[in-house]
Amino acid sequence: MLKYTLRRFFYMLVTLWVIITLTFFLMKLLPGNPFGESAAKLTPENLQILREQYGLDKPVWQQYLKYMGNVLQGDLGISYQYPTRSVVSVIQHSFKASLELGLESLIFAIVIGLALGTYAALRHNKAGDYTAMLIAIVGISVPSFVIGPLLSYFVGVKWGILPPGLWTGPEHRVLPALALSFGTIAILARMMRASMLDVANQDYIKTAKSKGLTSGAIINSHMLRNAILPVITILGPIAVNVVTGTLVVEIIFAVPGLGSQFVSSIVSNDYTMITGLTLFYAAILIIVLFITDIAYGLVDPRIRLGKGR
Amino acid sequence: MSAPLLEVNNLKVSFKMFAGEVQAVRGVSFTLDKGEVLAIVGESGCGKSVTAQTIMRLTPTPPSFIKDGSIIFDGKTDVTKLSEKQMMKIRGQEMGMIFQDPMTSLNPTMTVGAQIAEGIRKHEKLSKSAAMRRAVELLTLVGISNPGERINQYPHEMSGGMRQRVMIAIALACHPKLLIADEPTTALDVTIQAQIMDVMRDIQEKTGTAIILITHDLGVVAEMAQRVIVMYAGKVVEQGDLNDIFYKSQHPYTWGLLSSVPRLDSDKKAALASIPGTPPDLFAPPKGCAFAARCPYAMKICQEQDPEHLPVSGPTHTAACWLMHPDAPKVERPVAAGGGVTHV
């Protein structure tokens, strides 16, 4: 297991390096320059000074080497947009809200999604099944930028049950987390339903039944654990999607998160910010996938033992 | 013998499908005494497994439903009339079942010990440790070495033969009066088959459990069974003692089955004997004898009227075939003792 983990860790670093390199060079292909509209007002001399200050006058490969050197020291550079702030400090400042929002909506999604899917499978081809799957289809087809404003308007403004926006108390968390989790609830519910139905047809369920177990005992000790296995596999990518996909919802509910920073950095050619955030998100993705692998092993003894204890 | 352990009367089981009703079992009757080993043989799809699973009410309903008939267990309870809740008390406690494929019949995420103990804890209200001790005893009984360690293992750590032994242990956990083995050796290779049959015979002698053995392997039948039922297209076509079926059988289908058994001393160049044709579609079973279309001796009446069971030799040996009728032409039984063909 240790050897396996170390090898996975090495691949993780290689993947990150590829991502940084790709982003770095692709970004240089973006039209425009990081100094934005103000560049037009600058004299060519001033522009040249700025370029020298940021090292943009050097050949691209030199810029790349310098950047890689800095990244290895944990320095993602200074933002072009906010010359007083480093990319690292922007991440530190904004990511907390995004992460919190993401995790909360992930919890919503897992709890509601798995419950809904299980319920639908147990009521297979009955009214409960159809209702649950109808909810799931709505969840998949209606994007969060539609659900977000609807929740904000009805629950927040019209009925005044929960605050429609901002990010101060715990009550501000519910609506954005719910809006963000809608699609994920739907995906998890459908997946869990299919998985439960598949498990229900397995021979070992018949064995369990032949022992005289009650249906409750069969569901608890034989079905759920086996049905959840395939769901865990997609939980990793889904978790990343949720945590990093907070962008639109952040803007709708005025959450001071990282997603909005990402968009504005692309619009304004903020080179260091784009690479820094891409690197950061990529790292999260890879780490979460890694954790998923380990979680999978914990639930499924075949994998746990297959890799050697 | 007192009242039989199991009495199946005119059992009819159908499956409701989108396209219509599949009549999987079309009026099966038989009895099973306490401690008896009864084999049900027949081709795939002839209703053997459905009959067996219906005795434990394990066929999924819907789509399956019991159309007619009764299954009297232990002289008093009609299994077909019980609620699901009452069935839960009988399953595992009074009846146990072994399935065909040990590779898929055990839960991959539970230790085998827990899977054996589960039924014991449910029916006998034992503590976890007492149930586990019993699981160890059961594993010893079915011939698994190091049972103390094995109970903590998962199914994927065991071979197919060992898993089938575990299945036997699960089925026997609460000392059931009836053990139903649904093709217990089909998915195993030949040497393991013999071991599993040894275990089953051994256990039958030790515990006196009655066994219904479903198989299409006549070798297995000869080794274990006292009585044999031959099924075809959802009906019993012939039943009798082991010797009746092997040496004095009267139904052309039984002859076909017996002559289909490959022999070591047969000419290697000759094709293996088989029964030409396929079983009828049970969506729309034929009006007359279901075997008529494949029967080399079929007469006009066979197409039109289904034959009743007629006694052959002794009170328990019956066959449903028009050839038994006094007016029918005499047909020489073409099968030699032990399954060989005397003439073709």
Image (cartoon, rainbow, N blue to C red):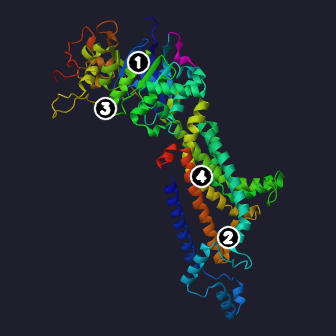
Disc 2: which chain? A
- Where does residue B164 sit, x and y in percent of width and height? 42, 31
- Where does residue A201 sit, x and y in percent of width and height? 50, 36
Mark 1: give few (<14), some (14-19) or many (20+) Cα within 10 Å: some
Give the residue type that dot 4 points to: Leu
Give the CA separation, mark 1 to mark 2.
74 Å
Note whether A141 is above or below B337 in the view shown: below
Badge number at residue A235: 4
Do labels 3 and 4 touch, CB within 8 Å?
A: no
Quadrant holding the N terminus of chain B: top left
Q: Which residues are magenta?
A: B75-82
Give the CA separation, mark 3 to mark 4.
44 Å
Quarter of the image for residue B88 reads top right
Q: Secondary structure at mark 3?
A: helix
Q: What residue would you read off at disc 2?
A: A263
- Where does residue B331 sit, x and y in percent of width and height? 20, 15
Quadrant holding the C terminus of chain B: top left
